[in-house]
């Protein structure tokens, strides 16, 4: 296809608003006499609440309400940001109260105060007396499933949330027949999203009793439903408004603070209440990335053909289920359209512990298994003495492959081109030779890793999206989508799609960036790298509908069939000759003001996307390892994608920069640390939690292999999360290449590297 | 029809919000660091601006901008709140600049200041030096058309805006053939709307250069267009938001402060600026009701049959055209489907004067002609010695009458029943006898007057309206309309219509009361008593579409034809048996979450109503006249309507109370007074301008003759303005009945009554 706007690096629509401070975030909205909500948090990781005395707090001047579990509905609800389903077995685990009656992690809310200002609210918090019965606790997933471990949810027999896996082919037989069987154990750590904007919301009650929540969320329509469920209110009586948000990464694909914010306004008769987390609170009481512990057993022919893999995965889910089993399932499924195995067995256990709750985070379980699998494959290639790239190429699935478990079809497959590009960019072959047999204290190595990823959740969950377009008198349009701009640039690419279809410049597409569940078309939200693919289809459909209405007006005017006309540069033209029939503005004016045919042009439509696409890619990295200090420096890194058509190369590059930066931290420095004696977080702040800074970050290279996929409305596949999947194993494999030491745990921070080098005798 | 919700006195949806202060008006919205705009006004009624020196004002600390005509586009624009039209001859007169370069009335803005607060803005205003060349001025419409009168718009030859009248039949011939010919001269005064909330707006520029205006308006979509025209910007780059508003009455069916508010934010690089009028400013620089001067010549048979009427009307339009010719035309046309005349001639002259601008006001020219015509008819009846009611009944048109000028068809006609009801309520026949030949100083009398009124403007202008309905997961819906709630209760009646069609209770219809031109369906706005009739059709259409989608889902479920099902009390039922098929909630959930058929139910639709209806009614009043003081007290008053189906009796009664109260002031006390030497307003405040207070107001009786009109979506016709048309002549006729004195000028305030009584020898 020859596109005009699709594929060009249009500046993001919200760029100026964001750099000039005009963009309004949840904190920028305020109401007269807004109250402030604050929360008392448990100092214990596991405890029963024997009693709470809130009388002193209530009596403090300026305190408007104090809330404990006793004041709230006893309805257990699930918080994960998934569409509701008729299939009860498929619903998320309902294990949560708005405020708990039993503490399951250190920092869990036990009471909330609403006061006229923050100082009074914090003072009141200190006046609440709680008597706890402290219980033994367990932080590690392996410990948590041992006989005699403390039971975290007392209605259950053990701490296993889910152990739903699957098997394709017969792994045992295949392993028996393999020339070689390799095993490997891999560990990933608990990390936090660290979006710039913490969770922040405010709520008030309208005069008809409906509750309005303005919140920093990726999933306004799901927040509406879950708040309704948590409060036992009809869902239509909740209204959720999403302003600009400062990052989400999956942490805002969960309903974290909204039910309590709603409960706060209910407690004060509907007066507006703001509830915003501090960074310290955000670290422990939102969601973290699941720490996973993998055990692989892989059968290979002596020529390096993969036969079968047996994967065991022990997943630390923290105190509540949230996205638990779903992340674990995603982890076990999204890598599958990568390599041909005769048999795959996936045996996960998702386990409650007395840790902060794990949930959705960019990559949704896949960065973990990517690290493990791609490290494991490198170890195998090394053993077999096959070049890692060659090893992977040997085993790649081909176009038209059908993933046996999801039934997703590989309609387009550009991974081999990605690998070619990566080798070229990093100068793979030369460097592989060059870096053999180093002995100095600064050693270099190159590594790579592959990934596959879907776009959206089909066939696991519903993929519905809506779009509405309203044409103005000058031919410009407003575009409303339920899909959410969370910093990724989705508003801009939806505007490009609209601009492309309607033949109008991008500045004539006004995207209504804020979602309001009362009026915004339904969309499940920003997650699963679904929006460009799924919502993009809705946007295209809406724009096509508007175009068709324009051409019908034009047809009435000049007798030409709508099919022989097009809109080009704000004019209705004859397709074949390019002759201008009339201006788009004229049609727009007629649609409003024609005395007989007046019918303002809008489209309010939705799609239900019942297919999926598989995006591919790889990372190539070069590292310099300082053997003496354990410092790993990434010298070069290239993150290469087959995401089908790239709608906006600049934004795509931005996704790569963000995703790789996140992955660098995942690989090298980030880890939440807890006091083993108390279960308390030790580094829940941005000083002690080691995010990668700009000084730690190399130039990040990106490249795109654009093979349009027929299933994408413009040939597009997914990209957002994909960027964060393969850097960690690529770096790990580069370190292996440089030092011969195989790290099977991330982050590879200097302390751990240093210790491992000592252990391995390098120092 | 048997309706469930239509026809019931549902409490107004915004009632609680308004009495608790939760409803947000323009003044309740604020932005951080909002600037304040103020205006310097001319002390002269007519003057050229020789020079303006703003340097001192600009140099004042805290002043961000000073604006004069020199800083603004030189585009003349029209301000009237009419839909745009392709027919150039039909467009409003473009005679206005955002800030003038020549002053045409006392109080006209000559410069604007934007400052960080009001005090500084007011200080800066005083620092602006203007050199005026003072010109002779003219306040009276008769003077203004005399040879040698000052020309107000220098590009014109005289001060006549329009003299477009019409003639049906041959008036001269008919008058010649009449048994008797009566003449009469009638005068009405300049009055102000006095809505509770003055004009108030604020504007800012979005980061993409689009201008957002939050304003107290009846016509957001028209404001968008006119601001675009005034600034020479594409209309789609203007966004107008209408919050709750505190009354409009037509004064906000004009684009009064928005272009300047937009210019203010442009002058400060898009920072938010509030521009709100004080009451004093609102009196002189918004719009007033046209003062009119009628001359009638009427031919009648000796039996009292009306033959012909010749009407001359001299209309004081003030300094700018605004709604000028349109109000004058309405005045000459809306009374026509009342009485059978063989011939009617209407010869108006709409005239510029150096007065505040006259524009739309409840009744749109008809209160004036109602006063004149119904007084004139009473004078004729008195001369012919026919009972006034009998006289009118003798001449009423019948059902199926076609108005020869507008071609509007009288499909329903309940005026004779209204008259019957009025006579009964006030005890007409007995009182007529009782009050004959009084001689005391307190005298009683009864009087009555009729009216007819259309619903909307068809065939004069476009009658387009849109509605959007979005269904929630619980079966509740949001309703969006471009039509505006301005206090009249339209949101509530639209909710009733939706509730009626969808079979859900009223509290499951959530009306989005605020209009936002970016997303709200197009509607021309609140005026011409059009919304219940015109927008009501759009609401019904949208609701029917939603219902049809619900029944299609239900049909897929159970195989029944959609046509044999209905929605009753939130359930889909079989029409004939009433058996419940499934709950509406279940269908709503399926529409969102069905894995195959997901397609959330919405409707985004519009109508173009190409017909009109004629509503009728009458007022019956009893007065007590204090001969010595000239005080007229209204003892009883009944305002009776044939408005077709009454959607909400309580709200209808509210309209009657408001409209009659307004008319009482019009009849008895209200009048703007000007200093003849300077042209300055003398009573532009609520102390000196004599509104009727609650103490002046009798119990106002209302009654409704409900004859459904087939053209109304639920049988409804118009009501809002109708209430204010006939009280003034009814009171005047009652005074005539009581005293024998015919007042041909309103208001009949004690001063004027006293003088007239002296003149007539009563005292």
Image (cartoon, coloured by chain):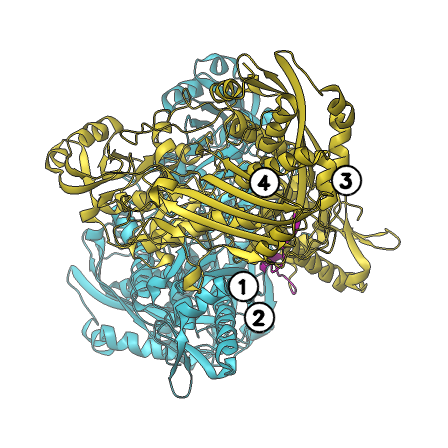
Chain colours: A yellow, B cyan
Residue located beneath label 4 in the image: A373
Q: Quadrant of residue A415?
A: top right
SS class, disc 3: helix
Residue located beneath label 1 in the image: B599
Magenta part of the chain: A596-614
Tell me if label 4 and label 3 are in contact, CB under 8 Å: no
SS class, disc 1: loop
* Same chain, labels 2 and 1: yes
Nearer to me, A743 or B70: A743
SS class, disc 4: helix
Residue located beneath label 2 in the image: B171
B616 over B1 or under it: above or below: above
**In the rendered structure, the residue with mark 3 lies on which chain?**
A
Residue at (64% x, 11% y) in the render: A440
SS class, disc 2: helix
Nearer to me, B199 or A371: A371
Residue located beneath label 3 in the image: A417
Q: Is residue A491 left or right of residue A53?
A: right
Q: Nearer the viewer, mark 4 or mark 1?
A: 4
Nearer to me, B131 or B566: B566
Magenta region includes residue B746: no
Q: Residue furthest right?
A: A577
Q: Nearer the viewer, mark 4 or mark 3?
A: 4
Find the distance from the CA under tag 1 to the CA under tag 3: 39 Å
Find the distance from the CA under tag 4 to the CA under tag 1: 39 Å
């Amino acid at each position: 296809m020859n596109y005009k706007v699709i594929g060009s690096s249009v500046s993001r629509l919200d760029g100026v608003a964001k750099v000039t401070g005009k963009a309004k975030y949840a904190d920028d909205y305020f109401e007269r006499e807004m109250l402030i909500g604050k929360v008392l948090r448990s100092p214990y990781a596991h405890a029963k609440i024997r009693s709470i005395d809130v009388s002193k707090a209530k009596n403090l001047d300026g305190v408007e309400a104090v809330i404990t579990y006793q004041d709230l509905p006893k309805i257990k609800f699930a918080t994960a940001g998934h569409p509701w389903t008729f299939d009860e077995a498929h619903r998320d685990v309902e294990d949560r109260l708005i405020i708990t009656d039993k503490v399951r992690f250190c920092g869990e809310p036990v009471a909330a105060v609403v006061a006229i200002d923050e100082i009074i609210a914090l003072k009141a918090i200190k006046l609440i007396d709680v008597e706890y019965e402290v219980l033994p606790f367990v932080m590690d997933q392996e410990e948590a499933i041992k006989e005699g471990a403390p039971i975290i949810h007392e209605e259950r027999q053990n701490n296993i949330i889910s152990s739903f896996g699957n098997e394709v082919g017969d792994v045992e037989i295949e392993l028996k027949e393999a020339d070689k069987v390799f095993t490997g154990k891999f560990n990933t750590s608990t990390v936090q999203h660290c979006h710039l904007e913490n969770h922040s919301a405010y709520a008030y009650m309208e005069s008809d009793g409906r509750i309005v929540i303005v919140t920093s969320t990726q999933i306004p329509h799901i927040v509406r439903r879950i708040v309704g469920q948590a409060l036992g209110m009809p869902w239509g009586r909740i209204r959720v408004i999403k302003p600009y948000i400062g990052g989400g990464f999956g942490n805002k694909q969960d309903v974290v603070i909204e039910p309590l914010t709603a409960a706060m306004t209910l407690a004060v008769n509907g007066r507006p209440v703001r509830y915003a987390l501090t960074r310290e609170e955000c670290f422990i009481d939102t969601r973290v990335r699941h720490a996973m512990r993998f055990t692989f057993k892989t059968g290979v022919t002596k020529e390096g053909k993969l036969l079968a893999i047996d994967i065991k995965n022990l997943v630390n889910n923290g105190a509540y289920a949230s996205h638990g089993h779903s992340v674990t399932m995603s982890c076990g499924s999204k890598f599958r359209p990568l390599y041909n195995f005769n048999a795959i067995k996936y045996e996960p256990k998702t386990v409650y512990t007395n840790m902060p709750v794990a949930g959705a985070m960019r990559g949704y379980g896949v960065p973990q298994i990517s690290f493990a699998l791609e490290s494991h494959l490198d170890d195998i290639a090394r053993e077999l003495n096959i070049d890692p790239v060659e090893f992977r190429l040997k085993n790649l699935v081909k176009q038209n492959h059908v993933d046996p478990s999801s039934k997703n079809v590989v309609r387009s497959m550009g991974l081999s081109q990605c690998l070619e590009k990566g080798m070229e960019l990093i100068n793979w072959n030369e460097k592989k030779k060059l870096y053999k047999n180093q002995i100095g204290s600064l050693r270099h190595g190159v590594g790579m890793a592959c990934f596959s990823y879907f776009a959206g959740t089909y066939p696991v969950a519903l993929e519905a999206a809506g779009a509405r377009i309203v044409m103005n008198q000058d031919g410009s349009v407003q575009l409303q989508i339920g899909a959410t701009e969370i910093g990724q640039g989705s508003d801009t690419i939806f505007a490009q799609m609209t601009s492309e279809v309607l033949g109008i410049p991008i500045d004539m597409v006004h995207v209504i960036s804020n979602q309001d569940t009362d009026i915004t078309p339904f969309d499940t939200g920003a997650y699963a790298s679904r929006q460009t693919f799924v919502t993009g289809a809705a946007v295209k459909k809406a724009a096509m509908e508007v175009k068709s209405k324009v051409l019908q007006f034009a047809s009435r005017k000049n007798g030409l069939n709508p099919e022989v006309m097009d809109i080009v540069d704000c004019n209705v033209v004859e397709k074949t000759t390019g002759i201008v029939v009339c201006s788009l503005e004229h049609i727009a004016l007629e649609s409003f003001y024609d005395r007989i045919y007046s019918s303002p042009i809008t489209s309010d439509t939705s799609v239900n996307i019942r297919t999926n696409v598989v995006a591919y890619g790889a990372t190539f990295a070069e590292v310099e390892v300082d053997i003496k200090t354990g410092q790993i420096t990434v010298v070069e890194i290239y993150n290469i994608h087959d995401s089908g058509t790239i709608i906006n190369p600049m934004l795509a590059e931005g996704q790569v920069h963000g995703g790789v930066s996140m992955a660098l931290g995942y690989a090298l420095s980030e880890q939440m640390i807890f006091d083993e004696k108390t279960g308390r977080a030790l580094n829940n702040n941005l000083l002690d939690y080691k995010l990668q800074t700009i000084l730690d970050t190399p130039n990040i290279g990106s490249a795109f292999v654009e093979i349009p996929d027929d299933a994408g409305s413009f040939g597009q596949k997914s990209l957002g999360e994909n960027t964060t999947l393969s850097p960690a194993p690529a770096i790990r494999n580069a370190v292996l290449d440089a030092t011969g030491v195989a790290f099977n745990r991330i982050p590879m921070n200097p302390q751990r590297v240093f210790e491992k080098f000592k252990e391995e005798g390098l120092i």
